[in-house]
Amino acid sequence: MYFSLYKARRTEQPSTCAHRGNRLMTMDIRSEIQQNPVADEVSALIAVIRPILIGLLGGLKADVVTELGGRDRVKLKMLPRLRRASDGDCGVCFELAVHDAIRRRDSMVMERVDTAVRGFCSLPGQELDSILFAAERTGSEQLIDTARDLITPDSVVMSGSRGRPVKLHRHLSGIAQAFRRPAARAALPYSISGVWKADLFLGTTDEDRWVATTVKSNPGDLERAPGLRVGIVPVRQGHSDAPFRDDSRNLVVCPLLYDGNFMQLFYEAWNIAQQFLAADARVPAEVALPSPAARQVARTLAERREFVVIDVVEALVPLAQPELLQSQEHQATVILERGDDTDVQLVVVPQPKKTS
């Protein structure tokens, strides 16, 4: 199991012929990978909350931290006063988690997605991949992680309806504009008029065929839209994780299982961080954190509220469970379809990983 910190940074590159007129950026991805089982609850929580603090710091708007002299000058007590939480944070994290799991060929995700797109959508080809189509909730731009060469002039969207196949490349800008401008939706072919609601395009690179996919952290949020073919959601308690066809929504639903042990650890650490910030970087009331281990972690943070976040993160190293997490870093390519630079600097993303 691991989670990642997605950090967007401006590094423009020349546009390719497939993306003429667009600007390219790179996104730094730092992965925290679980190496060993959880031993001590407090030390394990501290191990996980360290990168969460880094994520919260990185998520602050650049112009705000500039006023304070940079991110390395932000004190822990300032995080709750500078950060603006969003109701969609969890959903965005889930979208990125699913996308990255597919790109990494994670077997826990791939086997279910493969069954959904091949068995129910008749997707041809062997090289399954994912294109991230994510409209930023707080900005005007669209981010499309294509790994540069996934979208070609021959890329086809399999809408599930009769008629001539629709070329994804030809309508990519229109799909991006449709997210922000309702008037732009009328310009899309009817068979894909709801594709702007997609979070991913799942497809095969060898056949260049793709299906629009919606990813929801709440299965109840799945909705019907022309062109959407697959819905990826967490499995519901007591329900099968096998993909199935939902005729009422005209979607192939693909439920994903999670390793409850580490995901529970992550969300406990996330809850501590949320309650800690809500208490103005002090120890929350017992009703907010009833677990003794959680309160101990909050107390450990509160004792360091006057220090800068980066120093606090480093100071917690000896208190964290050793070798619980291992950091890895790599880059993803991002294409700016339109709009100005993003204010989003870092996103914390929990992700499943099969362990022996």
Image (cartoon, rainbow, N blue to C red):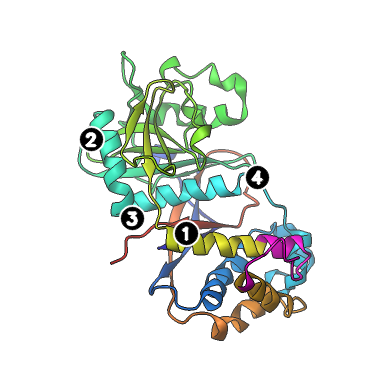
Q: Position of residue 143 (x, y in %)?
A: 52, 43
Q: Main secondary structure of the magenta part?
A: loop
Q: Amino acid at mark 3?
A: Arg
Mark 3 / mark 2, whichever is N-terminal: 3
Mark 4 / mark 3, whichever is N-terminal: 4
Secondary structure state at the residue bearing disc 3: loop
Q: Amino acid at mark 4?
A: Asp
Q: Amino acid at mark 1?
A: Met
Do the numbered discs 1 and 4 sit on residues whose CB atoms are within 8 Å?
Answer: no
Q: Position of residue 54 (x, y in %)?
A: 60, 68
Q: Which mark is residue 104?
A: 3
Residue at 49% of width from left, 80% of height from top?
321
- Give me the C-alpha separation between circle 4 and circle 3: 28 Å
Secondary structure state at the residue bearing disc 2: loop
Disc 2: CA contacts within 10 A as few (<14), some (14-19) or many (>=20)? some
Q: Find disc 1 in the rendering and name its residue.
A: 263
The boundaries of the magenta stretch are: 274-292
User: Quadrant of residue 202 in the image?
Assistant: top left
Secondary structure state at the residue bearing disc 4: loop
Disc 1: CA contacts within 10 A as few (<14), some (14-19) or many (>=20)? some
Q: Position of residue 277 (x, y in %)?
A: 72, 63
Do the numbered discs 1 and 3 sit on residues whose CB atoms are within 8 Å?
Answer: no
Q: Find disc 4 in the rendering and name its residue.
A: 87
Q: Amino acid at mark 2?
A: Glu
Give the vertical position of 333 relative to 185 (above or below): below
Q: Position of residue 165 (x, y in %)?
A: 31, 20
